[in-house]
Image (tube, rainbow, N blue to C red):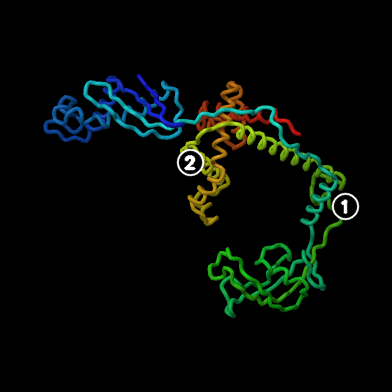
Amino acid sequence: MTAKWEKKGTNDGVLTFEISEEKIQEGMTTAFNKVKGTLNVPGFRKGKVSRQVFNKMYGEEALFEDALNAVLPAEYDAAVKESGIDPVDQPKIDVKSMEKGQPWVIEAAVTVKPEVKLGEYKGLTIEKQDREVTDADVEENLETKRAAQAELVLKEDAAVEGDTVVIDFDGYKDGVAFEGGKGENHSLEIGSNSFIPGFEEQLIGAKAGDELDVTVTFPEDYHAEDLKGAEAVFKVKVHEVKAKELPALDDEFAKDVDEEVETLAALKEKIKTQLVEAKNAAADEAIEESAIRQAVENATIEDLPWAMVHDEVHRQMDMFLNDMQRQGVSPEMYYQITGTKEEDLHKQMEGDADLRTRTNLVLEAVVEAEAFEPSEEEVEAEIKNLSEQYGMEEKAVRAALTPEMLKHDISMKKAIDLITSTAVEK
């Protein structure tokens, strides 16, 4: 094969290649075998007409288009490989010549992966991360656990923020009750912000048995069209006021919270260990994000093909929906539950698709610059890791991912690790 690549723009060009007469004849045979079964030719059983008779009746040229379709994908791939380009979108094919007895000449308008000029990506300076866990952090976490174990007890005093009131309510707009504005024996924690803004605050000071009017203004973005920005009055009756009663901070509380500990001191120690692990993980993640972002900012990518960004959006959509599927939520169910459509998810994923695409390009450039080449042992370890992570059999992982895909992912992780591990905190 003779393939010629001619660059026309930053990431665009024309790939010209020939399809040999040998390959053309292979395609003609495939095309003839496909079409002969549909022909009714006098003197021949259906599907038994000879190639010679077909050529005489219809002309060999009648097979050209089907023959080209049969051989073009493989011939295009071979031309791409020979020219050393890396296409990122479907080519636009232009047939320049299809003369009988001559090689066919094809031109393909191709968009290729952009060139990445790496800047500094090793030894980057990033802001020092806070990894310290204080006694105050432990106490705050302990109080959160304590609040979760609180019991609600009836009180006769007036309601204050944090109390729970049991109420009946009936909403009116312009003196007329509106749909969805009524509730009975509803438990509402004052300060939870679960009701319309301004509603809960007006219940502060109320006691059991009180009846009061609560006036609110619905937000402009409220889901009910007829209530957006509207003023409404809720007639409220208070049945009960309950206060939170916190448990004592003692060994019994510790055992109730965590069956693996026997004392409050042991619970505090465990909380501290967990907070240290969480803070270290958050710091490591921040370092990785900051270092990689710097590496991307230091690199130069003259122009980013739209097709690559588009593919990245759909890749993220597929990953998200696959995660949902593993949790038992189909795409149809997800859209129904969230009240969204596919185009809404597409728009959501567009937000940082440009940055994600640039990041992938820079990481691939680092892989090339560092000549990372995963070993067979590393590939096997990655298969085992993915098998455990997703609860799949190893053979299922092998069927889903080619060795090239696995090596690409391993190399990208090596690039991330190199950028991150050489970063300096200051």
Residue 414, position as x, y percentages in the image: 63, 27
Asked whether 260 or 323 is in front, the reply is 323
Question: Which numbered marker is on residue 310?
Answer: 2
Residue 298 visible within the image: yes
Asked whether 266 or 356 is in front, the reply is 356
Say what secondary structure mark 2 lies in.
helix
Residue 147 is left or right of residue 313, and the answer is right
- Of tags 2 and 1, the one toward the viewer is 2
Residue 421 visible within the image: no
Q: Which residue is mark 1?
A: 250
Mark 1 residue type: Asp
Residue 340, position as x, y percentages in the image: 51, 54
Residue 357 is left or right of residue 422, and the answer is left
Do the residues under discs 2 and 1 have CB atoms within 8 angstroms?
no
Residue 305, position as x, y percentages in the image: 47, 36
Residue 136, position as x, y percentages in the image: 84, 48
Q: Quadrant of residue 120?
A: top right
Asked whether 252 or 81 is in front, the reply is 81
Residue at 73 percent across and 66 percent down: it is 190
When the figure is inspected, residue 404 is found, relative to residue 321, above or below; the finding is above
The quadrant in which the C terminus is found is top right
Residue 165 is left or right of residue 344, and the answer is right
Q: Quadrant of residue 276?
A: top right
**Real-space CA distance between mark 2 and mark 1, rounded to the nearest whole angstrom:** 57 Å
The quadrant in which the N terminus is found is top left
Mark 2 residue type: His
Query: Which of the two labelled residues, at mark 2 and mark 1, occupies the earlier sequence position?
Result: 1
Extreme-bottom residue of the structure: 175
When the figure is inspected, residue 260 is found, relative to residue 147, above or below; the finding is above
Residue at 67 percent across and 34 percent down: it is 291
